């Protein structure tokens, strides 16, 4: 496992981080807690020292599992979590006042709840789970971040950028009050490279690349006949003819990648890590096999220029979250 600095901070985190949405159990079905704990512990054994969770993942259940696993980790683990929007609406809209979403007291209270769920004294990175730059000048979030840092309850502060809208965080990055941004970045969605990544690189803001496997689309395991349990988030994400669309895109991708030794998921993770501004990539890893496969993507190095140029041709302008 290789490690990278989280932006301009002194913290070095593993290239492969642990995305803990799936283990919350509410929107991703078919996993048991013991299996999730085994996956977390195996990830720590393989050098993973960064976990991204959220208070909204299973109403704190993901945080509780992460806290249990961190206690027995063989090395220090840096935990990131998120404050959910008070109105529980994803994504944020510029017309919604921040007092409905992130009032000062609510940010502090949510952080205290996360600390209790995690059974730790300090969150390495606290993030706002939605964002719009319409709030950039408001002091609610800024005062909360400063107070939480001052009290030692959090070490760093960041935001989770809206789905497929990386430019919605540009003004926030320019404030200098953001230590990291979490943004969708994968072979299909390369839009952060245009404006957000150069700005983060210039301002030395850390980048957490989320959804590197397109919610499973870039695993190569989705077929037109794939079925998900009722209530599983992916049943919504891949609804209608979307599975067919994914299959066609992945088949074309596999054709261009023929002959490469890595699996498609490993290539997808290496794609994210090939950009120097990315601090870590956070795939969901609910099972041991996924942990071991994902961790092998670290240490291999960036993809070569020819492969990256070819992957540019596989960008896909769409939003399955809508």
Image (cartoon, helix red, strand yellow):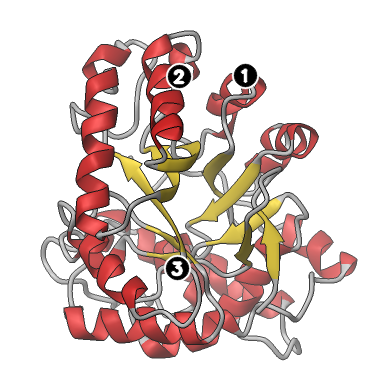
Q: Which residue is mark 3?
A: 18
Q: Position of residue 196 (x, y in %)?
A: 67, 34
Residues 247 and 161: in front is 161
Category of crowding for the residue at label 2, using alpha-carbon neighbours closer than 10 angstroms: few (below 14), some (14–19), many (at least 20):
some
In the figure, 210 relative to 219: above or below? Answer: above
Residues 257 and 173: in front is 173
Residue shown at 50%/77% (left/top)? 75
| Sequence-earlier tag: 3 or 1 | 3
- Split into 4 quadrants, where in the image is the C terminus? top left
Q: Which residue is mark 2?
A: 142
- Is 268 left or right of 105, judged from the image as shown? right
- Marks 3 and 2: in contact by CB < 8 Å? no
Mark 1 to mark 2 CA distance (whole Å): 10 Å
Residue shown at 19%/33% (left/top)? 88
Q: Position of residue 175 (x, y in %)?
A: 62, 19
Category of crowding for the residue at label 1, using alpha-carbon neighbours closer than 10 angstroms: few (below 14), some (14–19), many (at least 20):
few
In the figure, 154 relative to 305: above or below? Answer: above
Q: In the rendered image, which quarter is residue 209 located in?
A: bottom right
| Sequence-earlier tag: 2 or 3 | 3
- Is 229 left or right of 303, judged from the image as shown? left
Q: Which residue is mark 1?
A: 175
In the figure, 56 relative to 299: above or below? Answer: above
Residue 224 visible in rendering: no
Mark 2 to mark 3 CA distance (whole Å): 27 Å
- Marks 2 and 1: in contact by CB < 8 Å? yes
Q: In the rendered image, which quarter is residue 265 located in?
A: bottom right
Residue 73 visible in rendering: yes
Residue shown at 71%/40% (left/top)? 197
């Amino acid at each position: 496992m290789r490690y990278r600095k989280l932006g301009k901070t002194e913290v070095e985190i593993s290239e492969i981080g642990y995305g803990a949405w799936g283990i919350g159990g509410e929107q991703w079905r078919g996993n048991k807690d013991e299996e999730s704990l085994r996956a977390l512990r195996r990830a720590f054994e393989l050098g993973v020292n960064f976990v991204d969770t959220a208070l909204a993942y299973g109403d704190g259940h993901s945080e509780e599992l992460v806290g249990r696993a961190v206690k027995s980790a063989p090395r220090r683990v840096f935990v990131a979590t998120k404050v959910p929007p008070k109105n529980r609406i994803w994504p944020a809209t510029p017309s919604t006042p921040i007092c409905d979403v992130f009032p000062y007291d609510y940010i502090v209270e949510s952080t205290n709840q996360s600390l209790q769920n995690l059974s730790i004294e300090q969150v390495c990175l606290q993030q706002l789970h939605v964002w719009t730059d319409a709030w950039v000048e408001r002091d609610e979030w800024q005062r909360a971040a400063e107070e939480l840092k001052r009290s030692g309850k959090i070490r760093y502060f960041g935001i989770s950028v809206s789905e497929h809208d990386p430019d919605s965080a540009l003004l926030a990055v320019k404030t200098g009050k953001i230590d990291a941004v979490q943004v969708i970045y994968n072979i299909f969605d390369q839009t952060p490279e245009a404006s957000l990544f150069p700005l983060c690189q210039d301002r030395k803001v850390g980048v957490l690349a989320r959804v590197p496997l397109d919610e499973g689309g870039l695993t190569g395991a989705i077929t037109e006949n794939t079925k998900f349990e009722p209530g599983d988030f992916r049943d919504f994400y891949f609804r209608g003819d979307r599975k067919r669309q994914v299959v066609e895109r992945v088949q074309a991708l596999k054709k261009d990648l023929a002959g490469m030794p890595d699996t498609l998921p490993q290539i997808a993770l290496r794609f994210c890590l090939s950009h120097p501004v990315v601090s870590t990539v956070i795939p969901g890893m609910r099972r041991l096999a996924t942990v071991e496969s994902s961790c092998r993507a670290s240490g291999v190095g960036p993809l070569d220029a020819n492969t990256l140029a070819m992957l540019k041709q596989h960008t896909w302008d769409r939003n399955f979250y809508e």
